[in-house]
Image (spheres, grey):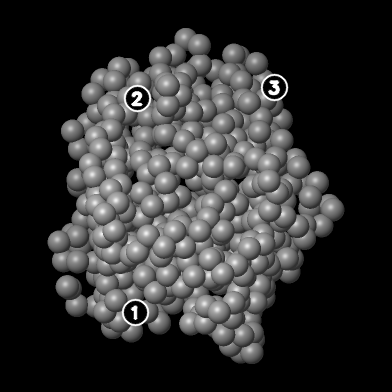
Amino acid sequence: MCPGLSAYKHFRVMPLLAFAFQPCGARLACMLRWIFLFCLLPVPALAQSPVLQDHHLSYAPRSAAELASAESRTTPTVDFSGPEPGENVPAGGATTPRSQDDRVFSAPSANLSQDREVDFKLGRALFHRPWSPAQGLSTPSDGLGPLFNARSCVACHIRDGRGHPPHNGDATSFLLKIAKTGENTGPDPVYGHQLQDLSVQGHAPEFKLRVTYKEFPVTLADGQTIKLRQPKYHVDQLGFGPLDKKTVISPRIAPQMIGLGLLEAIPVEDIVANADPLDADHNGISGRPQVVFSQEFNAPMLGRFGHKAAAATIKSQSAAAFANDIGISTPLHPQGWGDCTAAQNECRAASHGNSAVDGGTEISTEGLRFVTHYARNLGVPARPDAGAASILLGKKVFYKSGCSACHHPKFVTHKLPDQPELSARLIWPYTDMLLHDMGEGLADDFPEGVATGREWRTPPLWGIGLTQQVSGHNQLLHDGRARSLLEAILWHSGEAETAKRKVVSMSSAQRRALIAFLNSL
């Protein structure tokens, strides 16, 4: 292990030094990425404090008493005899009813004011809009593509829930991110940031995707055998020639949308406080923060969103999805051609919908604000059975197995005068928002920000038990390879190896209780 700052766990992140907290073998590649990143920073930015800040929020400082209260309320419990205060409402006052229909993820924050709910509905209309090609016209609804993966946001985020892996030729809510590795890390010089399998008339799609699976058994301590499936991705019919030899592929499923505004409202210092990149407490867990350069704020920021936390804000994540997934321009990505590169001349020369009506882009500043507001305020459903005996037993198993070391149960959000529905809420997302090495089995060799090819952001667990109800399947992990919660757990390795082994060695009753607890979240 390379030497570093032993007090890092209580240290506010210095992004330029982030590479120093990695194993020695990974430091050179990370250092090169940081040199590339900070070459983008203007000189005045480098002269400022390197402490990460929540530039995206207008928040009021917390008093000493409020800080002490937040720390007390978020300390992991050791008492499993009953539910904790507020555990049945995981989003506080923003918590929505746990309905039995497939729209349970689509309700707005329960405490959203009437006028802010109007903005929510306007955002929903844009989120659901099926975009059409420009075809030389100049109406605000034009602008799809020319290359794209889906025609709308909701086509990927099924009923605001998870997407699914390719099935019977349908890969709508699944995509392949690509990046060139080596000395000049960045987008593929020909294909850009991701591969698009759809196109408007007159343009060829970039590829066709096939997925095959190879199964292998894992035997549990009680004799039960679980078959895991290892996916292999076949990229066929590449329309612009072969990928660069140094280009790597990362398969991604669209994640669920609930509670994003609450995750965005967690104070950066509270997230960083849980980082332990040198494993100073010797528990085998060494999570570290993702740090990305924010084009939106012209500064390095904590990465929060996406499978590797490559986006700092909901707005930037939404704008990138519009550009790369649908080919729709926004003020953050104003190019009308979406993800087409300079090597794709005909694609860049195609008609687009950039219009003075929308400030020169296909979605205006106001339209992007509505979509961002919608994504911020998709409510988290209640947990009516949090106090059931079987659920409490499963919760105890979850904690005692070490799962809560990464899936941090709770936070208190910033005080937000302009977003009262998200302000000062005790929330239960079960994520630490940090990057963790998940082992070779889940590795994609895809560098993103400071994340290596083996690192992933801990995904929130709230709502995971409603995946079948909302999305019509139980296919989990970043690429949908796991067909159940137990399969997803058995894929864990790296920093989660010890916790996984404890699950493997459990009795059948303990595993059932653990799964029941997860399904209750």
Q: x, y percentage for residue 276?
A: 33, 75
Q: Give the side of residue 245 with respect to residue 334, left or right.
A: left
Q: Amino acid at mark 2?
A: Leu
Of residue 460 and residue 315, the one placed in the foreground of this image is 460
Which numbered marker is on residue 8?
1
Estimate the spatial distance between the alpha carbons at disc 2 and disc 3, rounded to whole Å: 33 Å
Residue 408 versus residue 31 in the image, above or below: below
Q: Position of residue 518 (x, y in %)?
A: 50, 59
Residue in view at x 52 percent, y 52 percent: 464
Residue 38 in the figure: left or right of residue 48: left
Q: Earlier in the sequence, mark 1 or mark 2?
A: 1
* Amino acid identity at mark 1: Tyr
Whole-percent x and y of residue 471?
Answer: 55, 38
Mark 2 and mark 3 lie on one chain; the one further toward the N terminus is 3
Give the foreground label among 2 and 3.
Answer: 2
Q: Which residue is mark 3?
A: 139
Could you tell me which residue is drawn at 30 percent across and 51 percent down? Answer: 224
What SS does tag 3 mark? loop
